[in-house]
Image (cartoon, rainbow, N blue to C red):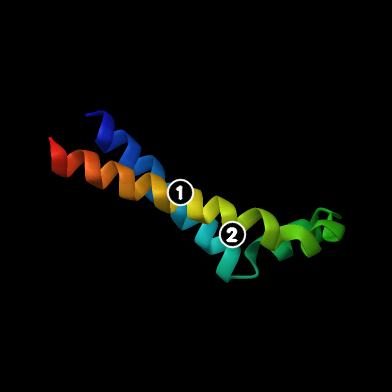
Amino acid sequence: MVSDKLLVFGIIGAVIAALCCFTPLLVILLGAAGLSAIVGILDYIVLPVLAVFLIIVVVALWRRRRT
C-alpha cells in the first residue's frame, strides 16, 4: 500500500519534472509571470528534481517486488 502511493507520487513527479525539463513549458510560464531571470538556473534545479523522482520510482518498484 505504501509502495503504491510512493510509486504514484514518483511517477507523477517525474512526469511533471520531465515536462518542465524537456519542453519550454516552464520557461514560458516564468516569462509570462515576469520571472524570466530565473530561467538561467533552471537546469540546476529541475534536473536534480527529476533525478530524485526517478530514484523514488526505483525505490517504490524495489519495495513492491520485495513484498
Which amino acid is tagged 2? Leu
In the picture of the structure, the residue carrying the numbered disc 2 is 47
Per the image, label 2 sits on a secondary structure element best described as helix
Which amino acid is tagged 1? Phe
Horizontal relation, residue 48 to residue 33: left or right: left
Per the image, label 1 sits on a secondary structure element best described as helix
Mark with earlier residue (2, 1): 2
Q: Gap between marks 2 and 1, in whole Å? A: 10 Å
Q: Quadrant of the C terminus?
A: top left
Image quadrant assignment for residue 66: top left
In the image as oriented, which residue stretches furthest toward the left? 67
Q: Quadrant of the N terminus?
A: top left
Residue 49 percent coordinates (x, y) = 56, 51
Horizontal relation, residue 51 to residue 35: left or right: left
In the picture of the structure, the residue carrying the numbered disc 1 is 53
| Front residue (pair 59, 34) | 59
Image quadrant assignment for residue 6: top left
Q: How many marks?
A: 2
What crowding class fits label 1: few (fewer than 14 Cα within 10 Å), some (14-19), or many (20 or more)?
many
Residue 46 percent coordinates (x, y) = 62, 56
Horizontal relation, residue 47 to residue 55: left or right: right
